[in-house]
Image (spheres, rainbow, N blue to C red):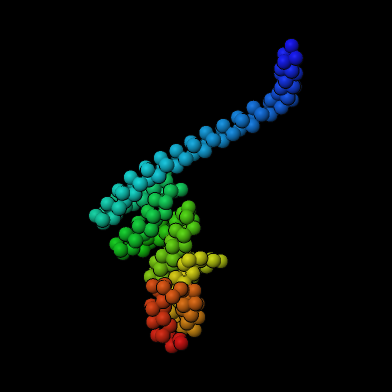
């Protein structure tokens, strides 16, 4: 009988607890389950997007090999429109731009690079796109725009390359003193193992810099 009374007390205590906190507990569990389901669905969607983008990127690569500008435009455009958040969108921008540049179409080369500057998911791709865009603008003799493309607070791992490209633009503008400063900055930012160092030093020496 004592056991039955003790069991009844426990049931009463549980009922009182549940009456007070049951709805909150169910609400929290529902949120957790929904969040877990959402996370899994998001991961599945991202994986699906990546797989589909990879197929289109293969088509782009084949078009580049064949130098088929029409198919390059089609495949890269599909990646930009349908899969901008994947790494393949960023890669496509750089690949398509190079194909256009190699074909001598500087105007077409700028468009995918500008897309990458504005929309690439990875900041390193955005920086690399800026660097290459500045190079295309330099070839077009659009010096002010080229310098503007390099105008960022922090170029990170591309700091030496940005300074080097800035020096190239300043040389093209006939501003030797400013170009020398840019090349000196490039050397300071380049590590000892940086492949740019010999080329930067060669440019600096050509300007009479120590």
- Residue 91 can be seen in this image: yes
Whether 38 is drawn above or below 202: the answer is above
The residue most toward the front is 2
Residue positioned 49% across, 77% down in the render: 188
Whether 12 is drawn above or below 64: the answer is above
Q: Find residue 121 and report its horizontal and vertical position in percent.
A: 48, 52
Please give left or right for residue 46 compared with residue 36 in the image.
Answer: left
Quadrant showing the N terminus? top right
Q: Quadrant of residue 165?
A: bottom left
Q: Find residue 173 and report its horizontal and vertical position in percent.
A: 45, 78
Q: How many marks?
A: 0
Residue positioned 42% across, 42% down in the render: 47
Q: Find residue 195 and report its horizontal and vertical position in percent.
A: 39, 72
Front position in the image: 30 or 136: 30
Q: Find residue 179 and report its horizontal and vertical position in percent.
A: 47, 80
- Residue 143 can be seen in this image: no
The residue most toward the top is 1
Front position in the image: 18 or 59: 18
Residue positioned 44% across, 62% down in the render: 128
Q: Quadrant of residue 95?
A: bottom left
Please give left or right for residue 67 compared with residue 80 in the image.
Answer: left
Whether 44 is drawn above or below 169: the answer is above
Front position in the image: 171 or 3: 3
The residue most toward the left is 66
Q: Quadrant of residue 193?
A: bottom left
Residue positioned 48% across, 80% down in the render: 184
């Amino acid at each position: 009988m004592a056991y039955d009374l003790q069991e009844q007390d426990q049931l009463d205590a549980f009922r009182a607890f549940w009456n007070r906190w049951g709805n909150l507990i169910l609400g929290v569990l529902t949120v957790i389950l929904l969040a877990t389901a959402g996370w899994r669905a998001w991961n599945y969607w991202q994986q699906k997007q990546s797989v589909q983008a990879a197929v289109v990127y293969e088509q782009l690569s084949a078009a580049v090999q064949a130098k088929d500008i029409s198919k390059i435009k089609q495949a890269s455009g599909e990646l930009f429109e349908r899969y901008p958040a994947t790494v393949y969108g960023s890669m496509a921008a750089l690949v398509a731009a190079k194909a256009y540049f190699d074909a001598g179409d500087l105007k077409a080369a700028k468009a995918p690079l500008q897309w990458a500057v504005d929309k690439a998911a990875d900041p390193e791709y955005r920086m690399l796109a800026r660097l290459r865009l500045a190079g295309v603008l330099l070839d077009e003799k659009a010096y002010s725009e080229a310098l503007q493309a390099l105008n960022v607070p922090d170029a990170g791992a591309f700091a030496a390359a940005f300074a080097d490209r800035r020096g190239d633009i300043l040389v093209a503008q006939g501003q030797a003193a400013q170009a020398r400063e840019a090349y000196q900055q490039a050397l300071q930012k380049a590590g000892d193992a940086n492949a740019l160092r010999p080329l930067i030093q060669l440019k600096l020496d050509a300007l009479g810099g120590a």
